[in-house]
């Protein structure tokens, strides 16, 4: 019995030592409230990143979303890139343009999947910040049944 307790305690200490102690999350709703109130994509990008000067993300940013969404309430969106320090997902048809912002830890993998709502057909935009430059990918999603507006 003592050996089991010792092994259990040892594994618990090992697991606790492996957990990173520098993880922290930024609440962008309180840190950058104007970004969430923005009704234009460029305004939201400027609020989050400090500039809206973006480069074409072809080959750098991959945005995956359906061409046609039968239900605008649950649209799967995936953003991936080889490198990046911050990722923002936006859309241009709902009243609140900014959908999500992710800070990527150093050495982290940029591969985020979420489900968003669109009230009607519109564009989904992904912005990835890498080495101080902004890369943009966008895709039009046709919505057949509204998700936000009915």
Image: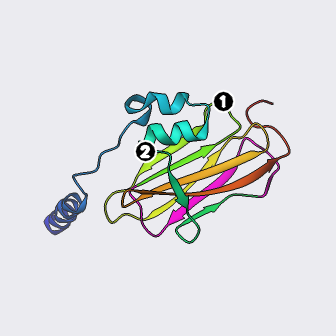
Q: Quadrant of the N terminus?
A: bottom left
Q: Residue at x 43, y 45 (%)?
A: 49
* Residue 46 versus residue 19 in the image, above or below: above
Asked which quadrant contains residue 96, the reply is top right
115 left or right of 67 in image: left
Asked if the stretch drawn in magenta spans residue 41, the answer is no
Image coordinates of residue 77 in percent, x first then y, are 63, 54
- Looking at marks 2 and 1 on the same chain, the residue that comes earlier in the sequence is marked by 2
Q: Which residue is drawn at 42% across and 32% down?
A: 32
143 left or right of 20 in image: right
Secondary structure under the numbered disc 2 in the rendered image: helix
Asked if the stretch drawn in magenta spans residue 72, the answer is yes
* Residue 59 versus residue 92 in the image, above or below: below
Classify 10 Å Cα crowding around label 2: few (below 14), some (14-19), many (20 and above). Answer: some
* Residue 50 versus residue 33 in the image, above or below: below
User: Any mark on residue 79, and which?
Assistant: none
Residue nearest the observer in this picture, 131 or 87: 131
The image's colouring method is rainbow
Whole-angstrom CA distance, mark 2 to mark 1, is: 20 Å
Classify 10 Å Cα crowding around label 1: few (below 14), some (14-19), many (20 and above). Answer: some
Q: Residue at x 57, y 53 (%)?
A: 126
2 or 1: mark nearer the eye: 2
Image coordinates of residue 48 in percent, x first then y, are 44, 41
The magenta span reads 67-85
Q: How many labels does the image show?
A: 2
Image coordinates of residue 73 in percent, x first then y, are 73, 41
User: Any mark on residue 95, and which?
Assistant: 1
Mark 2 lies on residue: 49
Q: Quadrant of the C terminus?
A: top right
- For the residues labelled 2 and 1, say whether their Cβ atoms are less than 8 Å apart: no
Q: Residue furthest right?
A: 144
Image coordinates of residue 67 in percent, x first then y, are 78, 58
């Amino acid at each position: 019995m003592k050996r089991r307790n010792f092994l259990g305690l040892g594994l618990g200490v090992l697991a606790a030592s492996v957990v990173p102690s520098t993880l922290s999350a930024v609440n962008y709703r309180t840190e950058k409230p104007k970004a969430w109130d923005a009704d234009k994509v460029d305004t939201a990008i400027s609020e989050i990143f400090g500039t809206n000067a973006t480069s074409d993300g072809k080959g750098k940013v991959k945005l995956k979303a359906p061409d046609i969404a039968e239900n605008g309430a649950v649209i799967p969106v995936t953003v991936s890139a080889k490198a990046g320090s911050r990722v923002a997902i936006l859309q241009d048809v709902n009243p609140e343009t900014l959908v999500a912002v992710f800070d990527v830890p150093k050495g982290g993998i940029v591969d985020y999947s979420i489900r968003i709502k669109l009230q009607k057909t519109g564009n989904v935009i992904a912005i990835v910040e890498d080495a101080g430059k902004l890369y943009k990918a966008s895709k039009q999603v046709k919505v057949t049944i509204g998700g936000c507006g009915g």
